[in-house]
Amino acid sequence: MNKELLFEVKDLSKSYTADKKALDSVSFTANTGELITIIGSSGAGKSTLLRCINRLIEPSSGSIKFKGKEVTSLNRSELKDYRTNVGMIFQGYNLIYRLSAIENVLHGRLGYKNVIAGALGLYSEEEKQRAFELLDEVGLSEFAYRRADRLSGGQKQRVGIARALNQDPAMMLCDEPIASLDPKSSEAVMKQLREIVDTKGITCIVNLHQVKTAIDFSDKIIGLRHGKKVFEGLPSELTLDTIKFIYEGTKDEATEVSAMEQIGDSHLKAGASND
Amino acid sequence: MTSAAQSVQPKYDNSYLRKKNLTIIAAIAIIVLMGWFASNYSDYDSIYAISSIPFALSWLFTNFMPTADSLQELPEILYQTYSTILAAVASTTLASVLAIVVGVLGSNVVGVSSVVVRMALRVIASVFRNIPIVAWALILLLSFKQGEFTGFLALFLSTFGQLARLFLDTFDEISVGPVEALKTTGASYWHIVFQAAIPLAITQLMSWILYMVETNIRSATLVGMLTGSGIGFIFDLYYKNFRYDTAGLVVLVTIIAVIVIELVSNKVRRSML
Amino acid sequence: MEKEIKGMERTSSGKIALKTKENSNNAIKYTLIALVVLTVWTFIQMDYGNIDLGNALYYSLKDFGAMMFQPNLDAGHFTWKTVLSETFVTICVALLCTIGSAIISFFLGLLAAENFSTPAVSNVVKALMSLIRAIPTILWVLIFTVAIGLGTEAAVVGISFHAIAYLTKAFSESFEEINPGTIEALKAAGASYWPIVFQCVIPETISKLLSWTFIRFEINFSNAVAVGAVAGAGGIGYQLFQAGSFYYNVHEVGVIVYTCLIVALILEIISIQLRNRFIIN
């Protein structure tokens, strides 16, 4: 697939309090059809970065360009259009639990609908058909009429993915999509995201705190530490020292470093041959 | 850790316990004092009150016992109970429509963005809730005169205030995540209200509405005494004419009605989860 | 394009269905329908009296405006001293009801709590409390008025009946939330009933009990106003009734309403704080 520049973040900063910066001059770019993971310990600013990108949180300074257009200066209705173009999935799934799976998927269409039809949940047959196809794609069409809270964690997350896909997005932001899932469901969800990137050319920016998953699935990895970008590169360029530096002094240090040590050998060899 | 610290520990504990005991004694003393002062000020004789309870209850059971005579009034009592229940349901339903609007627009999670408007809505809800229901009834009586409709209006206005406050709390407590998720799809404000906020809150809202219906049957009794309608009106009528046996039958029917409605609404509440 | 997908269902009109078939959603739907039907029926059969509704609404709004925006005691039926001291009497009545019923409810709450009582006792107490709760406060007060005479005593006892039923329920639920492990640990250490109550139950639940008690204080105050109006016992309610129903003076009603409103708002603010701090975790 032909890759071209889709998205660019430049010198993005965010401070909640005057003395501490949650994000400190972060810059990176993303091409179409790329899966980028952002790693770092909890509190490193991953979630803030993602939420600044679609302006759920207003950045303090810096620039965000999507398809060449500045995002930070969009007005209300332009922001809505932009958000429609950028899907998001969440650690807590954030489905409306009383509604059926298919209704939750259809929520992805709200950005395209007028006030009354959207508020009353009136969708066209084409929209319903498409929602079913998406639900089928994530393997859940048989659960379409199940109330969302009756689904398992992995199933909920896949409904979340179908909802985001239903927006026809050019980019998807995934905030710790597998942090609440068991290893098997995590694997399934990550595979699903990889497939979306490869077959639909949608760019995914994924927050993760498991380094191993990041190495297995991403095209590019960005490491954040105390709000600063401390690493950007291919998975094969990630070294044990970098991991140690990213997680140093945090509660995730021990688990991530030892996980890295276990896979370390083969991976580092691959990295060395790249040099 | 050190031996010095260990020897200091019990001493510290002691003073802590002594302080705690003192606090408890002080609290009890304050409560007793407040009670004594309140009794004096309001001319209340607690000994008389407590000692009269057994007498009052035995009096109640002899004089308020429904007799065969009072059963003749049963159809009228049942009819008034029925109209009281209807007034309670209608005032709650209508008030809940208005209260949902206030609850949504005034809530911190899905409310309007203007803080001033949100505060204003909260103040309105609070004022309506805290104006005594008696005052509503008295003001309405001046123009609407005695009757069912006046009772309904008084109930409606005070129910609106109470439900608005309960609904504001409910919409404040819905989870932010799903609301945020719909925002990221590019949904507009009203989409979020109808597709996220209301489905998220509906069980709690229904539960409050049912609770309010129960409460309103009791409030309707009070209001009815002023506006001349429903259970309150006929109780007052029999009571003032010293027909205590029939008044007792009214109480009995009220108990049954309230308990039946409580049981039904508990069942409904459970099946809504 | 009209591809059928596994699991897809259609409505009778051939459109793709969306709603879950869960009973819970039906329960909500049918409850709403029932409420609306009953409301419509109420309006159809209601006796609107022999008055011009538009006119009455106009004058009510005018009266409401006068009450809220021109409160004064110019007519001279009441002095400020009467209004304030009678309001204070109402606060005292509410306070007496609250103190008494909180103490009684503590013991009844223990009897009603499943983890501190036997199932039989617990059920009997709970049933008795819902029986007491089912009788409107005002009926309790009127019943006591004939039995023991008109006065503060009838008001306090009458309001307390309802308050006890309410607090017993709230208290017993707080007791039932105590972690069973804590009680077991004390039992294993050989503690008997009352030491457990004083060393574990009270410290664990005191903040919740106080919050509930305060919330009830707020309710007792508004009940005391109502009781004063209808039964003529216990403070400012009676003056409110006189102003509205005897002197027909909305300005005086306004003054009394504002006094009650201020007291109620202060109580409400305190109880919201307590509730946020202690009941919702």
Image (cartoon, coloured by chain):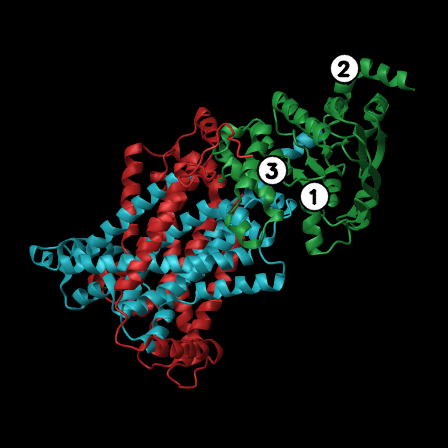
Sequence-wise, the earlier of marks 3 and 1 is 1
Which residue has dot 1 on it?
A: A85
**What residue sits 40% from the left and 54% below the top?**
C99
Which residue reaches farthest bottom? C75
Name the one closer to the observer, B68 or C132.
Answer: B68
Residue A262: assigned label = 2
Measured along the vertical axis of the image, is residue B121 above or below residue B61?
below
Count residues near mark 1 (Cα–Cα under 10 Å), then give few for <14, some for 14-19, many for 20+: many
Left/right placement of residue C134 relative to residue A201 reads left
Instruction: Depth check: give the residue in front, A217 or A143.
Output: A143
> Residue B245 appears in which quarter of the rendering?
bottom left
| Residues under numbered marks 3 and 2 in contact, where contact means CB atoms less than 8 Å apart | no
Q: Secondary structure at mark 1?
A: helix
Q: CA distance from mark 3 to mark 1?
A: 13 Å
Label 3, secondary structure: give it.
Answer: helix
Residue B43 rendering spot, x and y as whole percentages = 34, 67
Residue C153 in sight here: no
Q: CA distance from mark 3 to mark 2?
A: 36 Å
**Residue C145 x %, y %:** 24, 64
Residue drawn where x is 34% and y is 59% of the image: B90
Kindly identify the amino acid type of the residue bearing the numbered disc 2.
Gln
Real-space CA distance between mark 2 and mark 1, rounded to the nearest whole angstrom: 39 Å
Residue holding disc 3: A163
Tag 3: residue type? Arg
Give the letter of the green chain.
A
Q: Residue at x 48, y 54 (%)?
A: B167
